[in-house]
Image (tube, rainbow, N blue to C red):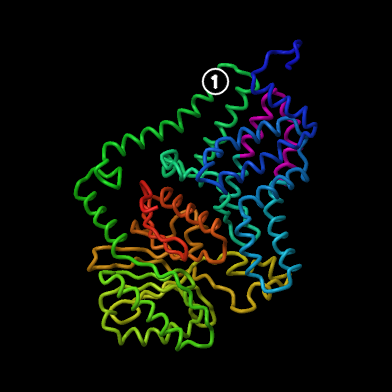
Amino acid sequence: MCPLNTRPKTLAYCIMSALINWVNVQPFLLYFSALLYSVPLLFPYCFWWVTFLVPPFFLYSVRTIKPTFFKGFIWGALVVLGYSSSFLVGIFSLLRSAYVYRCIVVCVIVCILAAWSGIWFWGMHYMLPTQTHKYGKIWLWGVTLWVYLCWMEYGCLVVCGRFEGVCIANLLVPLIQCPSLLYFAPTIGVPGLLGALVLSGIAGVLYCLRPTWHGLVLLCVGIFFWLSGFLIYRIETHQDAAYCDTGYYDTADRDQRTIQHNVWTRDVRVIPERFQERGVPFATAHAIRDAIHACIRCNPEVKIIIFPESAVVDPQAMILFEQLWQQETWAQRVHVFVGSFSWQGAQYCNTVYWLYNRRVQRKIHKNHASPLTERMPFVGASCGLQRLFFCRSPEINPMVDIPREMCWFDELKLSGVPYICSELFFNNQPHDDHAATIIALCNDVWVSERGAQHMYRCAQFKALLWQRDIVYCTYRHHAFLRRQRLLGL
């Protein structure tokens, strides 16, 4: 029951206050908001809409607590364990050491990511006393929440030697289940959408605590922003319902893009096989050739065959396969992309081989290496962690100085730019100057099925954010992701 000697509150305020008094543990709602953060990322098909509840629930839970580094660290650890559990298990399985060392490495990763939220709460401990306005603290928490979300997206891995973040922590990714809500993503980017999300949460909390017309106007502005993108998207879809790709009203251009969509979906095949044998390059080369033969027999009209990233582990096997390729008659009419490795002098590279017309047209070397799984950061190297991750193969050297060129398929009237796994997920902007379709060769066998689905949704989000069509090829998923409506899902 609400006290009679105080200002009347809303029903939501009374319910949440009664819940706090019943639990009698103030940080309970704070830690529950950390679990709520992970719900839309883990279960997006049913709970993508929970994304809109995360900011207001968090802001309501922190409005009266005394922030400390420990509380922020625990909150961040719960968040990290929630959204990255599949990837942490994958890293655990990649390690070649005793279980105790594996657990230590995983705990260190969680602690590094959780430390950022601890630093955030520690800073708020000194900033909150400067706010004298009754609701100034909520605004300050909201602004710093936006900074934290942007930092996790763009810079939280700076300790690994490169200014980059983790896209799997992006709260906007689950909204790909309703892509019309992301209509303004190409215009205002991720920071703009995160700002709109947090601003809507601030408006909801302020109106819940004190229903004034100022809070009502702010709440209506937030709702109008998300609904306007939804309605504009639906109107454009209705106007161009006869075509799969919306937003193109030039007939010639629209027809050309429809033809390209048909080619990418009809004439491209992915062979999700891995050839992990080492020391038997001759047998591996013949196994690759047999896999291509089987694919052509089942799909006589196939034009492009793609093996995902790291399909061939032994670089020597690819050298022998190049010799076998020159002897095949069908090698003149089929483009083949094979994810493998190569030595460029003393540098070990993650490489995609593009073969056509009985020869290797080009070797595309990866210009980004994922921390821990492909390269060891300086901090880990100083602790001697190389032998835990790279006891069977050397570290990957990113070829950052080599520009990425397009692959032209003249007979198909198509063009594409190969991206190799982390080049798609870790880059904030496309690292090429072309507008061609992205051919993304990725490796998702080291994570669970849930982690592979999360990678797939991140690729969908990149297609919409960058406004680039993506041919997504992994061992578990392969689809043509349209930049407008994400068809082929």
Q: Is residue 471 left or right of residue 267?
A: right
State whether residue 350 is above or below residue 260: below
Q: Camera-side residue: 196 or 338?
A: 338
Q: Camera-side residue: 52 or 142?
A: 52
State whether residue 455 is above or below residue 100: above
Residue 26: image x %, image y %? 77, 33
Residue 229: image x %, image y %? 41, 35
Quarter the N terminus occupies: top right
Classified by dominant secondary structure, the portion drawn in magenta counts as: helix
Number of disc labels: 1
Q: Is residue 23 left or right of residue 233?
A: right
Per the rendered image, the range of residues in magenta is 119-145
Which residue is at a point 52% across and 35% down the rendered structure image?
Answer: 196
Q: Which type of secondary structure does the marked residue at label 1 adopt?
A: helix
Q: Quadrant of residue 322?
A: bottom left
Q: Residue furthest left?
A: 252
Mark 1, residues whose alpha carbon is within 10 Å: few (<14), some, or many (≥20)?
some
- Amino acid carrying label 1: it is Leu
Which residue is at a point 52% across and 54% down the rendered structure image?
Answer: 454
Q: Is residue 241 left or right of residue 149?
A: left
Q: Residue furthest front?
A: 298
Residue designated by label 1: 216
